[in-house]
Amino acid sequence: MRLQARPGKSLVVIDATDTSELVGWAGVPHRLGSDAQAVTKELHAAKRDNPECTQAFTFPFMVAIHNDAATSWASLAQVQSNYNIVEHLREFSLDGFPMFHGNSFFHYRRVVSTTLNDPIHGSPAYGDITMVNWTQGNDWNWMNPPLILTAQQLAETGQYQNWMGGISSIALGHAEDHALVFSRWLIETQSTPEYPLSHLAGADSPMSTLSGLSLTPYIREGRRILGRSAYGQPAFMMLEHDIRRDQANGRDFSPTAVGVTHYAVDIHGCRYRNWEQPWEAQGAPTYESAVKPIVIPLESLIPQGVDNLLIGSKGIAVSHIVNAATRIHYGEWSIGGAAGATAGWLTTQAPELTPSEIVASDRLPELQEHLRQQGLRFTW
Ligand SMILES: Cc1cc2nc3c(=O)[nH]c(=O)nc-3n(C[C@H](O)[C@H](O)[C@H](O)COP(=O)(O)OP(=O)(O)OC[C@H]3O[C@@H](n4cnc5c(N)ncnc54)[C@H](O)[C@@H]3O)c2cc1C
């Protein structure tokens, strides 16, 4: 595929994929996995870099309160998992959450309610459906093998010539096994005569797949670009102390703000099958209350080395720890909105500029006004 501006027009490309595929394929400078404290100087960073340590990823599926005469259980029981099924089973727990009553597991992501009762506290009814996306369930965090291919692995697998997504199909397979075994475990351990559970699969099921799993997994962390020189760093990256209320030396990004978000540092941590040291930022997770509203500066969307590329998703210039707070819906949409509106403004209002020239040419206030007019916000 060749992306080319029309004659006389300028072109800005936005990478808004979950893993920053264009960044990986084009060899744009980036980081992958956990960062060493020596690199980021973050209080809770790991002692060493581990490019294998991205957050857990998940194949969601749907279960219904429905008696299918054990048909879906029977097909789940046929699943041949690559790792021994016992290893998968050891990972599962509802962690004290009730399945059906009160603020329950079933309410967590209920997508069909036949009674339209209180979504938080009302008990579900026959026919209700929930989407399952559960940490001690279908999350897959084993780095055997890791999900996201490094530059060396991309070269070894010929993906610079023939891009295949830049992720490990073996890791995807293990995650699919894990999700299907979890669904079977839910049916076996949680069904009651009043609330029989069935796994929804097939062309007519909500996921529209034969397995009942989502077509693509939920990937919480991919490649993260390194920004250009900004805010006192030669290769800009938002860091843990920039977003924590209780740490000193946080920088104020409001002068170049284009987006804003707020969330906990929510790391679904990596691990190895045999519990070798994962070099995960294990002490970093914290509640939303310890995190400031996170201002997204324009510099975090601009990669090194390519002048007409912007990042429009979780692949912005953040550390592994900060990604855990910017990776969710509000953050990604704020980033995506900023990237899209910036590209639109550049191509229509300032075609002579590249993204990295906006701040230097004092045109940022104009861009910010354009973002406001588009309904975007960058103050909390
Ligand atoms: C199961 C699940 C649970 C979640 N839970 C929460 C939650 O509780 N709270 C929360 O805030 N957020 C949650 N999120 C995250 C939230 O949904 C995302 O942050 C948000 O939807 C991202 O929106 P987006 O438009 O940036 O990206 P997406 O909606 O993911 O869009 C990316 C698009 O890029 C396309 N794409 C990918 N690769 C390529 C390629 N190579 N070429 C062309 N196109 C490509 C995809 O098809 C897709 O359409 C959850 C996500 C999932 C999947």
Image: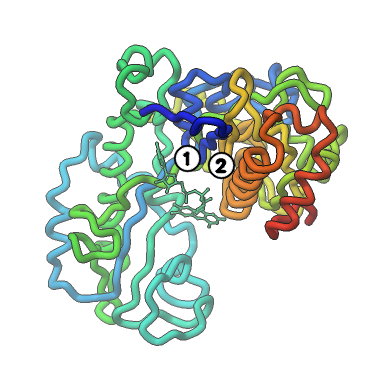
Where does the N terminus fall, quadrant-wise?
top left
Rendering coords of residue 2 (x, y %): 40, 27
Q: Nearer the viewer, residue 66 or 273?
A: 66
- Is the CB of mark 2 within 8 Å of ligand 1? yes
Cα–Cα span, label 1 and label 2: 7 Å
Rendering coords of residue 17 (x, y %): 47, 39
Residue in the picture at 74% in, 39% down: 297
Rendering coords of residue 144 (x, y %): 36, 27
Residue in the picture at 25% in, 34% down: 83
In the rendered view, tell whether residue 233 sits above or below residue 125: above
Residue in the picture at 65% in, 42% down: 348
Where does the C terminus fall, quadrant-wise?
bottom right
Residue type indicated by callout 1: Asp
| Residue 132 visible in the snapshot | yes
**Where does label 2 land, which residue?**
313
Residue in the picture at 39% in, 79% down: 113
Q: Name the disc covering residue 18, or none.
A: 1
Q: Nearer the viewer, residue 163 or 90?
A: 163
Rendering coords of residue 49 (x, y %): 58, 19
